[in-house]
Amino acid sequence: MNRSRGFTLIELLIVMTIAVIHAGVGLTLYGTSVTRAKEAALSEDLFQMRKAIDEYYADKQKYPSSLDALVSEKYLREIKPDPFTQSVDSWQTTMSEPDAANASAETGIWNVKSGATGTGSDGRPYSEW
């Protein structure tokens, strides 16, 4: 019985199917990890900007007029781009309410949110973070 060495077509198909399944699972996990990394960066950026706004208010008894004021006054080194939009201009700011006790006080930025569309892994839209 003279049999040549090699793989049969069925063996090759089984190996290729297993390789495709592994690649699909790997790509899915990679996509999920990239999204989670962007969400972590967004959460940290929002925390740092809100902290800087609070520190600015504690020092000056007024809110900053713009996010750039936080940089120029050295409360932040830079305004980082939104991880999802890749833009510095997409941050959405919420202005403070006028102070009834001090009518001459200027309004300023009280809060900052992401301008990204989409929903996070926790079910909340990025614009509500």
Image (spheres, helix red, strand yellow):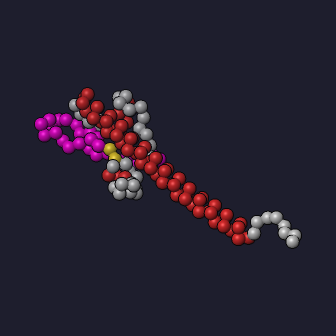
Q: Nearer the viewer, residue 18 or 65?
A: 18
Assess whether residue 99 is covered by the magenta stretch.
Answer: yes
Horizontal side of 54 relative to 8 (left or right) equals left
Q: Residue 45's x, y, as percent? A: 39, 41
Q: Nearer the viewer, residue 126 or 14?
A: 14
Q: Residue at x 40, y 57 (%)?
A: 118
> Relative to 31, does residue 99 appear above or below in the rendering?
above
Q: Residue at x 22, y 31 (%)?
A: 61
Q: Nearer the viewer, residue 76 or 15?
A: 15
Magenta region, mostly helix, strand or loop?
loop
Quarter of the image with the N terminus in it: bottom right
Horizontal side of 3 relative to 109 (left or right) equals right
Q: Nearer the viewer, residue 124 or 102?
A: 124
Q: Residue 52's x, y, as percent? A: 32, 34
Q: Residue at x 41, y 45 (%)?
A: 40
> Relative to 114, does residue 21 appear above or below in the rendering?
below
Extreme front residue here? 1
Q: Residue 13's x, y, as percent? A: 68, 68
Q: Residue 66's x, y, as percent? A: 33, 38
Q: Residue at x 84, y 67 (%)?
A: 4
| Range of magenta residues | 85-111
Assess whether residue 5 is covered by the magenta stretch.
Answer: no
Dividing the picture into quarters, in which one does residue 23 lie? bottom right
Can residue 55 be seen in this snapshot?
yes
> Relative to 105, does residue 22 appear above or below in the rendering?
below
